[in-house]
Amino acid sequence: MLNNSKQLMQDLGKVVSLSSISSTNPRIDTGNRAIVEFLANSFESLGFTCELIPTGGNPEKLNLIATLGSGPGGLVLSGHTDTVPLDENLWSVDPFSVTERDGKIYGLGITDMKGFFPIIMEAVKPLLNHNFKEPLIILATSDEETSMQGARTIAQLGRPKARAAVIGEPTGLQPVRSHKGIMMESVKILGQSGHSSNPALGHNALDAMHSVITDLMLYREQLKERYTSPLFEVPHPTLNLGCIHGGDNPNRICGSCELEFDVRLMPGMHVDTVREEIRDRVKKVVTPLGLTVEIEGLFTGVPAFFAEQNSALLKIAEELSGNAPINVAFGTEGPFLQELGMDTIIMGPGNIDQAHQPDEYMSIDMIDPCINVLRKLITKYCLV
């Protein structure tokens, strides 16, 4: 059974219950207003001053900045409030309700990463009667799983600012020194539909997409040869063919087809360069076939992340967690917080191998250690 407060379990249940799916498909995207408003009310009840910041002009997409204390310096604890889409049929439990079983808590977003916010609340409660000499700032963002527009909005505003920032992505409480970058692309091929009995009656977009995919797979292998780094468990770039949509019936020539994919960038790779290479390759494949192709970046991309050289926060996190720094393959909002001038690392409860899949869970034995580490970080950066 969970040994932490009943309120913590209730709050974990609440954040999981509030759907906040972000997707490039607007029919699936639910926005994050409900969870941000819940978090704002929760942190206000603890004495924080809260500000809701719209993201990209969409009223259902919000960021939250919750501040306790004032002045320069202090600590930002940051996380995203959105989750990836899901197929409920693949879950053995209700994804929108926490289920405690065999030392684990299950639920969509429990690890990646809505569960981080109730853990912050639990960490700060015993410190509320202390004098905060420097501010504690909670940042909750939108759309990390798609465009990272929430973090981009924050960076454009130039706030919040503090001495240090911890992004609570699931790292098994191992402080992250560096991570790969990420970009997401869309290729849409427009052909001409017609009766399938005679291929000459149209131009099959799905056939053309097959050629594009073949070339992208070749490009993937070439990237592996060009870029390697022993820092990462997967020591080369990856290109993942994520989803494809095309056609409307088996007996019709496919009139249009769209592919979406991502690229995980190694140090030394630049988003704009890779994007231009992809555009050139795709056009060379499709243009001779007499079809139209539209190539679009689904978002502007995130570069690889490196903690500051001789980062004080990284050293403190290593001492408090008892874990050596690591390097990871997944991307985060770290570069945007670094852009604001903060000593930034990534460290949080849960493990990334539980994210983005059915029956996502957080091991209960990670919760108390995370609370203790966060409490000590808050004390060091805000109270002492």
Image: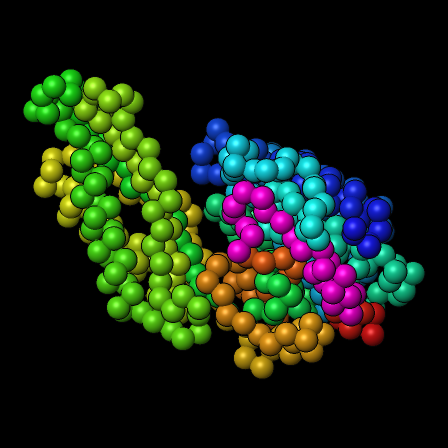
Q: Nearer the viewer, residue 287 or 96?
A: 96
Horizontal side, residue 66 vs residue 142: left or right:
right
Kindly tell me whether residue 63 is visible in this rendering: no
The residue at 28%/63% (across/down) is: 223
- Residue 194 lies in the magenta-colored region: no
Q: Which residue ends up furthest to the front in the rendered image? A: 102
Q: State which region is magenta.
A: 353-376
Q: Which residue ends up furthest to the bottom in the rendered image? A: 310
- Residue 355 lies in the magenta-colored region: yes
Horizontal side, residue 236 vs residue 350: left or right:
left
The residue at 25%/51% (across/down) is: 216
Q: Main secondary structure of the magenta part?
A: helix
Q: Which quadrant, please, contains the C terminus?
A: bottom right
The residue at 40%/75% (across/down) is: 230
Residue 158 lies in what quarter of the image? bottom right
Q: Nearer the viewer, residue 274 or 263?
A: 263
Residue 93 % position (x, y): 63, 37
Residue 129 % position (x, y): 92, 61
